[in-house]
Amino acid sequence: MPDAATRRIPAIAPTGRTAACAAGVFAAALAIYLPSVGHGFINLDDPQYVTDNPFVLNPTAEHLRRVWREIGHPTTVAGYYQPATMTSLMLDSRIASALGRSAPQGPPHAATFHATAILLHALNATLCFLWCLRLSNGRIGAAFAAAMLFAWHPVNVEAVSWVCQRKALLSALFALSAFIAYDAYVRRPRGATLAAVALGLTLSLLSKPTGWLIPPVLLLLDAWPYRRLDRRAMVEKWPLFAIALIGGAVAFVSQRSSMGRARIVPLEDPFESLWVVLHNVGLYASTLLLPLRLSPQYPLPERAAMTMAAPAFLFGAGVALLIAILAARSTWSRGRAFAVAVVGYLLLLGPAIGAVEYMGAIAADRFQYLPMLLPLAAIALVMPRFPADRRGRLAAVIAAAVILGMGVKTFRQQAVWQNSVSYYRAALDFAPENPDATYGLGRALYERTTGARPDDPAARKEFADAQSLFEFTLKLRPTYSLAYFALGELWIERGEAERALRIIREGLAQPGADESGRFLEGLALTHLGRPAEAATCYEEYLSRRPTRREALRNLANAYSRLGRWPDAERRYAQLVALDPADDQAAYGLGIARMTLGDPGGAVGPLRAARALAPRNATTQYALACALAAGGRLAEAGGELEQALQLDPTLIPRANRQRELALLRNDPRWRERLDDAVTHEDPAATEPTR
């Protein structure tokens, strides 16, 4: 092979036509995804990434440091280490707050997150154009066609329109940057450009670790089209292979530690691994070439259905055989485009094709976002220049028709991701007896009833439909623990906590029961007035999910009921650190510190609670007590006056409150307090839940 330094590879000079095509690709990618800006969040994974993630909802320097420090056991999300992705989502949350698109104590609107995702996809499509342009040595038409296929391919809708898939977009962005930097290195070998490749690879893995096989893909490109595969090309990549191996190991360890599942299927069940891989080869190849029937969920079949006579297996085996024959033929030919495209595609798809099991589905469209770049690059390399005759015009028309057809399908496919209900209904259209989809639709309908009036007929119907779907899920899969927990949650809401507890514990007895059941068990015990048992459940749940705010709040409240004020103070402090906008947590922290004899330490959180809920008389009254106990009588008097104006029924309590004894000696207050009509104290002795 010729040496990289001596082989003549022409430089690519930017032109006005190049800039116009790049701008066209960027604009087309933006335009096709405009409907997604108005979509909401999906209740699958979006809660843990955004809507229920305190680190994203309240981005602080400490939260950012924690996101980057949690390598072996991430607690911010249940999954692998992905700090670049979480940083991006935190930045979006900050932007949404600055634009006034988020409530002070609620989740941000989804528009900011969707807009960023669309911008990232448009940027990726533009980088795809520039990379294909460099690979093809300036063939603008071929590079433009390849980039438009990437921009408008329907299988990419899942990665672009689903907020939690920011990781796929960022990973591809940095991978494309690495590919372009490597092309620059091949044309003019320098340490700086190779360092840029390493940086792009590292950032890609910090966004999503599925790109850890990028270094072997670079070796493929060395073989063709660069034609520089020699010992030097292999040796120079040892830093890239080291980065990839570290990234892959961190991903496996963090996934297994956080989720408890990341099994290597070939080591445990070779036949199952072969079945899944061949099934997925057929599925991914067909959806890439002819994306007519897509689904947001491709359910994992039962083990009994994994037979060699299954149509999906036979189809996958046939496709795999055909691909192998064509790849071998391509390898023996001069071009080798097909072989490089297929092997590169399968390498990048490898972590998700079935060798490692880390999710309940058998496949997902989003996994093709990065791998499809290799077939598209091959298209750009082998696509002939269209001559200015009838045949050339016909070929151009066919290419435009294919791209346009992809765009129409992409535009329509976005409707699947409009909200949780549309998502699960589409999944059920694909597989009507998919228990994950029946459970998810029930969950989506139940969540829509939150905050509805009890007499609202539409809400009552959705509530009943949700219950029916959960029960149907258990008929499909009697071991589905989440369905038990959802039914228990319904019965808690109906005031039947004892019945709910039985159902939840039945779910916990199922094999591989989801850990959220311990939280719901604690919730049922709380409603039954058994705080000591509830606290044990919350503690166990928080050992795996330490950032779950509801569990922290309920645990702190349970400790306050039990009189375990040091424990309550510690948990309220953790909750305030996670979510400074939680006025109930700040109030609880203040009450705990007052009870522990630290009125000075109580003032800060009580002031914060008052600022967050300025019309809450109980909070202002507690602040007045803390100030008075600390000897700050003038400030205490002002707070007490405002509290009593908001709620005059607090006057009898103020007349007896020990902390207000010195304040009662003030003539301004003595007459008002002494003349108050005594009546029964309102029960507000513990933080509001």
Image (cartoon, rainbow, N blue to C red):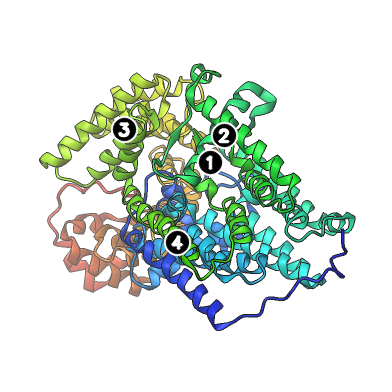
User: What is the CA distance from the residue labelled 2 to the residue labelled 4?
Assistant: 29 Å
Marks 1 and 2 close (CB-CB < 8 Å): yes
Q: Earlier in the sequence, mark 2 or mark 4?
A: 2
Q: Who is closer to the viewer here, 76 or 631?
A: 76
- Dot 3 alpha-carbon crowd within 10 angstroms: few under 14, some 14 to 19, many 20 or more: many
The residue depicted at 88 percent of the width and 64 percent of the height is 3
Taking the view exactly as shown, the residue that stands out farthest to the bottom is: 16
Label of residue 285 in the image: 1
Count of numbered circles on the image: 4
| Mark 3 or 4: the one toward you | 4
| Mark 1 or 3: the one toward you | 1
* Residue 5 position in % (x across, y down): 86, 70
Q: Who is closer to the viewer here, 109 or 498?
A: 109
Q: Earlier in the sequence, mark 1 or mark 2?
A: 1
The residue depicted at 58 percent of the width and 28 percent of the height is 317
User: What is the CA distance from the residue labelled 3 to the residue labelled 2?
Assistant: 46 Å
- Dot 2 alpha-carbon crowd within 10 angstroms: few under 14, some 14 to 19, many 20 or more: some
